[in-house]
Image (cartoon, rainbow, N blue to C red):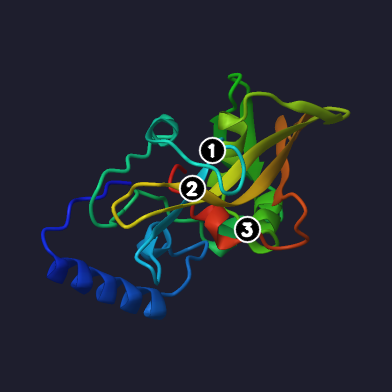
């Protein structure tokens, strides 16, 4: 996220009005259409709010340093809120609903182990838990450890943090934290690994808050 310096009070006022209008009229980010206003916004008191996947701060209310954000690939400098991260569109519904439970995505976890995401688990992750394929990918890549979940399945966990800074990009603090869990089964299946079984927010039965799937570093 890059924030550029405003030049005068009139410009700041215009930005706040324009942002408020955008927030009031924007359609919330969905699995097939991502609204950039969900990535970095200015709230009523001209604060900047965004979310990241990874360890920053030390719990709700704690300070988030520039160094911590930089480690996640996010830059916050004094100025106006603007962010247009590059994201990939979600697959078409016909691909997600394939009865063959085919592999849609592949990546390596933090230890170099190949992980796959199949169509049936992905459909559940997308529609029941309000996440995208990027969420389990980032969780398995940025988690530093994994725990045996039983049999050939392993559990990965990563914090999703909502961060609020003042209008100038200073005094950033954690305002909400949700832990995201991803379960991966490495058993053989259809000539490959089974892969991701599920991904969800711990302690939440159903949909994760939007800020989790809108994290900037995905």
Q: Position of residue 99 (x, y in %)?
A: 71, 56
Residue at numbered disc 3: 126
Residue linked to disc 2: 173
- Mark 3 vs mark 2, foreground winner is 2
**Alpha carbon distance from label 3 to label 2:** 29 Å
Secondary structure type for disc 3: helix
Direction from residue 113 to residue 69 in the image, left or right? left
Number of dots carrying numbers: 3
Residue at the (49%, 45%) spot, across then down: 52
Q: Earlier in the sequence, mark 1 or mark 3?
A: 1
- Cα distance between the residues tagged 1 and 3: 28 Å
Tell me the quarter of the picture where residue 143 sits. top right
* Vertical side of 92 occupied by 159: above or below: above
Percent across and percent down for residue 128 are 70, 62
Q: Are marks 1 and 3 in contact (CB under 8 Å)?
A: no
Q: Residue furthest left?
A: 7
217 left or right of 1 in image: right
Residue at the far right in the pictured view = 151
Q: Residue at x 68, y 63 (%)?
A: 207
In the drawing, what numbered circle is on residue 57? Answer: 1
Tell me the mark number nearer the camera, choosing from 1 and 3: 1
- Circle 1 crowding by C-alpha within 10 Å: few under 14, some 14–19, many from 20: some
Work out how far the residue at label 1 is from the one at label 2, CA to CA, in angstroms: 7 Å
The answer to which image quadrant residue 205 occupies is bottom right
Nearer to me, 13 or 21: 13
Sequence-earlier tag: 1 or 2: 1
Q: Are marks 1 and 2 in contact (CB under 8 Å)?
A: yes
Horizontal side of residue 189 vs 164, given as left or right: right
């Amino acid at each position: 996220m890059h924030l550029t310096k405003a030049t005068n009070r009139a410009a700041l006022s215009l930005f706040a009005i324009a942002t408020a209008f955008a927030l009031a009229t924007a359609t919330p980010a969905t699995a097939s259409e991502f609204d950039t206003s969900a990535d970095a916004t200015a709230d009523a008191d001209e604060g900047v709010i965004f979310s990241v996947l990874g360890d920053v701060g030390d719990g709700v209310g704690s300070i988030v340093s520039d160094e911590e954000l930089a480690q996640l690939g996010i830059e916050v400098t004094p100025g106006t809120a603007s962010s247009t991260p590059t994201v990939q569109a979600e697959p078409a519904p016909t691909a997600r609903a394939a009865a063959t439970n085919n592999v849609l995505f592949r990546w390596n976890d933090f230890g170099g182990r190949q992980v796959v995401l199949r169509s049936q688990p992905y459909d559940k992750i997308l529609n029941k838990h309000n996440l995208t394929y990027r969420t389990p990918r980032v969780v398995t890549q940025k988690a530093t450890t994994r725990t045996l979940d039983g049999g050939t399945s392993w559990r990965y966990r990563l914090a999703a943090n909502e961060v609020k800074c003042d209008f100038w990009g200073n005094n950033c603090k954690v305002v909400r934290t949700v832990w995201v869990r991803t379960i991966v089964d490495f058993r053989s299946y259809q000539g490959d690994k089974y892969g991701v079984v599920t991904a969800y927010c711990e302690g939440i039965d159903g949909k994760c808050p939007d800020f989790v799937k809108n994290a900037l570093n995905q």
